[in-house]
Image: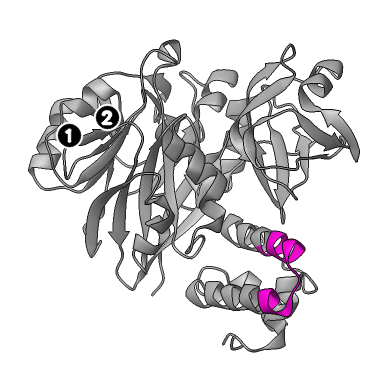
Amino acid sequence: MPATISDPLQTISEVQAAIAAGERLFLAGSRSALSQLPMGNWVGGTISYFMTGEGGLQAEDRVFVTRIPAFAINVWAEDYGPQELARIYRDAPAHGFTFIVLPAGTHVHRLFAEQAPSFDGFLMRPVVGWVTGVPVDRIGLDSPAVFNGRTGAVLEDRCAALHVQLPPNKMADLDIVNIFESADGEVARFDETGFHVSQCRIGGKPANLADYICENGISTEFPLVADYNGTSINVSFQKNDPVARTVDLFAPVFPGVDYRFAKPVEDYEGAFARQIAAEDCEPYFACNCILNYLYGHLEGKKTGCITGPITFGEIAHQLLNQTMVRLYLRDIG
Amino acid sequence: MLPDASHPVWELIATGERPLESRKPTVNLLIHSNKLSYERDQSPANVRQIAEKTHHFFSQYEVLFPAEIAQILR
């Protein structure tokens, strides 16, 4: 079922009924909402923000439902702690895809962000999902979580996964929509992988990133952008501390990668609509970033025709920031 | 039909001597990953490993990436 057909934002009682009927589900909702669901073949994560057919909205008493198609051959839920995470791609079906959710700000989140590209099976088995969060006015007060419906576990430092094996005539295809592109500024490079940075090289010269941002009046609403062979990959700013001269990021920077500051985007709604308008089919699943929702004032506004959770980080093979992720299930014969 | 894993084209892709242009993020993540790996370790063993991984990737996703396969076959 494409993400845009019917209303995937459902009441708790509707989701309870779907689970009781044996449906296999990937869910996004508040902790309160997900806690009211029975055990079953589902995985979910905490989030209260959604792209809907009527526009972006916050809801505590609704659950965004992605139904696993009936043609899926096998579907199973697992969860992974930091010690087990490296085998997630190996556990994924040889022909299919895996949905995952990771709690924001946890060890398992950081581990996935920094090391997923080095895990065995990376890119060979599609992994798609998002980072769970809390209402923005509850950041630091409440904890993001993930749910393994098979065991009934509510987990605050584990990754929950729903592995989906597809039939031979279907194939998972991941795509991203990035409304940001690099400005024509100097290149920043970093010596170490990390979410917390200070020293770097900008334009080939040693620099402090926090100082550089302040001295050049750079808005941290817009991300750093790296060019991955023509695909723009963002790293978003969480906090610039000019006193400590440090910068916290929502995804790690990596050594050997060239980063530039992004060109400012004024009209997020229009930028998404322009990129998505050219599409000739609808995704099976999509998610978008909470920073796009907040900075782009997307409450009540549409992101093209796409619906899905609005999250604290997006995953298409690896962790992404300020990006829309889309999963297509292609017919291949 | 893809060239088999021992064909020189895969090592050319592994080292970046045969650039691949793509609009597909999955392909571009692979090429980027190859580039970083090659910059870290240019030994023949690593080049072979990257080449085999790239061959395996395109074998698996041949139907999704016809434009990229056409560049490989050129």
Residue in the foreground of this view, choosing between A26 and A105: A105
Element at label 1:
helix
Chain letter behind tag 1 = A
Residue position for label 1: A15
In the displayed structure image, the side of residue A196 where residue A175 appears, left or right: left
Work out whether A307 lies above or below A36. Answer: below
Residue, far front = A83
Residue A253 seen in this snapshot: yes
Task: Identify the magenta region.
Answer: B34-47
- Where in the figure is residue A236, as x and y percent of width and height? 63, 30
Does the magenta segment cover residue B44? yes
Residue A7 appears in the picture as rendered: no
Q: Which amino acid does label 1 sit on?
A: Val
**Which element carries disc 2, helix, strand or loop?**
strand
Q: Residues within 10 Å of mark 1 (few under 14, many from 20)?
A: many
Q: Which residue is at a point 11% across and 35% down the rendered structure image? A: A38
Q: Which of marks 2 and 1 is nearer the N terminus?
A: 1
Alpha-carbon neighbours of circle 2 within 10 Å: few (<14), some, or many (≥20)? many
Q: Do the residues labelled 2 and 1 touch (CB within 8 Å)?
A: yes
User: What type is the residue that disc 2 sits on?
Assistant: Val
Residue ranking furthest to the left = A20
According to the picture, the residue beneath numbered tag 2 turns out to be: A63
- Closer to us: A116 or A264: A116
Asked if the magenta segment contains residue B64, the reply would be no
Colour theme: one colour
The quarter of the rendered structure image containing the C terminus of chain A is: bottom left
